[in-house]
Image (tube, helix red, strand yellow):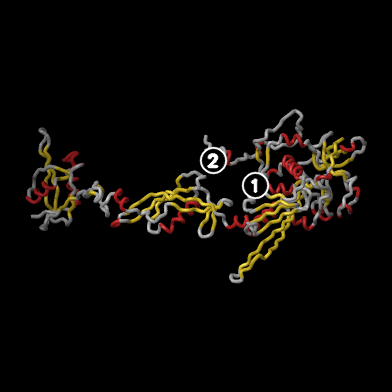
Amino acid sequence: MYIKINALEYYNICQSYRPYTGSVVYSVCIQFEWFLKLLHSGKREGTGSFSHQKVVCRHHPAPPFQFVVVKRGGPQRGLEKHSANLTTTPTPFIMEYMQAPATSSQGNILCCTCGIPIPPNPANMCVSCLRTTVDISEGIPKQVNLHFCKQCERYLQPPASWVQCALESRELLALCLKKLKGNMTKVRLIDAGFLWTEPHSKRIKLKVTIQKEVMNGAILQQVFVVEFVIQGQMCDDCHRVEAKDFWNSVVQVRQKTSHKKTFYYLEQLILKHKLHQNALNIKEIHEGIDFYYATKQHAQKMVDFLQCTVPCRSKTSQRLISHDIHSNTFNYKSTYSIEIVPVCKDNVVCLSPRLAQSLGNMGQVCVCARVTSTIHLIDPNTLQIAEVDGGTYWRNPFNSLVSPRQLEEFIVMDTDIIRNQKLGAGAGIRSNKHTLAEVWVQKTSEMDTAQQYHCRTHLGHLLNIGDLVQGFDFANSNVNDEFLNKMNPSHIPDVVLIKKSYNRSKRVKRRNWKLKEMDKDREGMAPEDERQYQDFLEDLEEDEALRKNVNIFRDASKIPVESDTDDEGAPRISLMEMLEDLSLTDATGGEGADMLTE
């Protein structure tokens, strides 16, 4: 008779005799050999040992059959029995083990060249012998020339383009790999990186890792170094510069004034926003500056910046240089003319009645407080302030009544602060930074006389008795202006005070800061430019709002001089408003020196 059980019944048997086998049933099952003999012999009772086996049956059960499990206790215990029902069938009894997967170990072979044991590979050779036999870097040059322009510091990217790349940058790495691309079509690029070289050696070393399939499908990887030799070559743009036929567009900035305060302020704005870097040349001429550019886009960018920075108007013109009739292309030279309003800081102006009324019924005689993107005006009689943009100015133009050279020095004899002044209907905004006062002044050149002048001023917060102040004498001057000549003489002040005067020599000695300047060609410079530049520096010290748009650097080479006789009332720039002027010599200690580290 053949007996067959399924997995579920086998599990039930184990669970049924679990109380009689103790802890052994947790780790073992019935031994397969003993279990097979017991079922085939037809015995209804027997004993056996246990071991850990897993059994799987493949057929459905048949009629029931009783199987007895016996456990013998100690000397004081009797025989304990437990029975379980099995099923019988006339079909053969089939069982099989579940064994763990077999593990295979790979053997070694001998290299066909040197005979050392190695893992099997398609070439049957070790890596050292394979490298000596096959050179996968064959055909790739180990030394390549790289063309570099010294003037603009750009590298040549074949066929005719020049790109700006820093040392050990991604752009330079891509440029070097493109030089090798034509010779690396049969290999696979795995990695590439720079090796350190001396910056002045004109050598760039590139560490390249490649792979290639060699004998019988074996893949070989190799690392080698490619050296790039930097050779000097002038680019087309720099060649045109040297040939004096270089610019494609020019921006001509003009201001018809005798003072250059607006140009000095504009220069600092250009330096701060780094718009001078695209200029091929900057030439300073009488009443203006010319900026030369290689492309029309750079010139247009400068024009847009000037229109947003200073009140101005622009004109554009083109001149045909050449024409290709085959490709129908034209070569033009463009000229952009920028005219800045002819008004500077500390100028006295006379507005038209219509413009003065539109600005809040302010007085026609005003003082220009500053010139930024708009003209900031203040009425010295009422402290009313107004801003005039470029479009408004060109619709209602006005001129400066006095130049800085016509200002005279006065001494304050008496001052009286005016408080709670009421303005008329429709008046504009009043300034909170100034104080209205009535003062009696006398010219320092007329101290031997008793002639004094009475006027109102917006400098009441600065002036004290005995102070020196600069102003313009309307009573003893002949001014030719369209709007001033039509004014009621009773509305024209005798004196208009502009700004408080300080000792210039002492201010220069204690000034421990400086400004940067653009590299430009100078033509026809007036001898008083140094005095005008000092006036601009003093304006920066006196006007906090003006120097917010200017980068001021600390001058480490100049030690400020302090003494008891210094004029303490003169404005100064604090150290917190200064920037540190850094250069390459600060980091390297000079050309060719080692890098300084902490």
Q: Camera-side residue: 53 or 271?
A: 271
How many callouts does the rendering have?
2
Quadrant for residue 59, please give it.
bottom left
Under mark 1, the amino acid is Lys
Residue underneath mark 2: 592
Figure quadrant of residue 340: bottom right
Q: Is residue 30 above or below residue 447?
A: below
Q: Position of residue 561 (x, y in %)?
A: 71, 31
Please tell me which residue is depicted at 88% across the width and 46% down the height of the picture: 474
Expressed as whole percent of the image width and height from the top left, the position of residue 94 reads 14, 54
Q: Residues within 10 Å of mark 1 (few under 14, many from 20)?
A: some
Give the labeled residue for mark 1: 272
Front residue of 521/7: it is 521
- Under mark 2, the amino acid is Gly
Q: Nearer the viewer, mark 2 or mark 1?
A: 2
Tag 1's secondary structure? helix
**Residue 53 spot, x, y in % from top left:** 17, 46
212 displayed left or right of 429: left
Give the farthest residue toward the right: 450
Which residue is found at the position 83% from the left and 56% from the top? 354
Return the disc, 2 or 1, that comes first in the chain's sequence: 1
In space, the residues marked 2 and 1 are separated at their CA atoms by 29 Å
